[in-house]
Amino acid sequence: MIYEWREYDVVPGKMPALKSRFEKITCKFFEKHGIKIVGYWESEIGGNTSTLYYMIAWRDLAHRQQAWGAFAFDPEWLAARAETEKDGPLVQGIRNKILRPTSFSPPLGS
């Protein structure tokens, strides 16, 4: 199992719209394409309050490539995304990291 940590820098004033899109639209497409979300976070203390953070669990890099590619080019997702961005983009920058647990990491969720 590997994990992907993603950070979305949100256009000022667009955090409610981005969170709504994830909750009502994106999560369904992630499920459709076998993308397993560990969780979503916002900074409460420290960090940037205009960044949405989330983590994905992947079986391996091949799983990531297949599922992420299918999601990214899904015509229904592209249409839904375009609709939510008709007044401009919601995200102005994305950072991600692929993480591998150490041998001494506790099982996820413990």
Image (cartoon, rainbow, N blue to C red):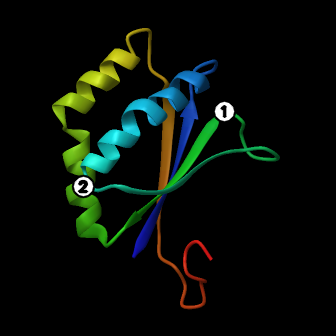
Q: Residue at x 20, y 58 (%)?
A: 66
Crowding near pointer 2: few (<14 within 10 Å), some, many (20+)? Answer: some
The vertical placement of 23 against 61, above or below, is above
Q: Residue at 25% of width from left, 65% of height from top?
A: 63
Quarter holding residue 71: top left
Q: Residue at x 17, y 30 (%)?
A: 75
Whichever of labels 1 and 2 marks the residue nearer the N terminus, that label is 1
Residue 67 — which label? 2
In the rendered image, residue 42, in percent from the top left (x then y), is placed at 67, 43
Of the pair 110 and 8, the residue shown nearer to us = 110
The residue that mark 1 highlights is: 50
Task: Decide: is 101 above or below 30.
Answer: below
Q: Residue furthest bottom?
A: 103
Q: How far across and down, in percent of the image, does residue 27 sit?
A: 40, 42
| Rendered view: 94 above or below 14 | below
Q: Quadrant of the C terminus?
A: bottom right
Q: Is residue 14 left or right of residue 1?
A: right
Q: Residue at x 45, y 28 (%)?
A: 21
For badge 2, the amino acid type reads Ala
Q: Secondary structure at mark 1?
A: loop
Front residue of 5/19: it is 19
Query: Which residue sits furthest top?
Result: 87
Q: Secondary structure at mark 2?
A: helix
Under mark 1, the amino acid is Ser
Of residues 31 and 7, the one nearer the viewer is 31
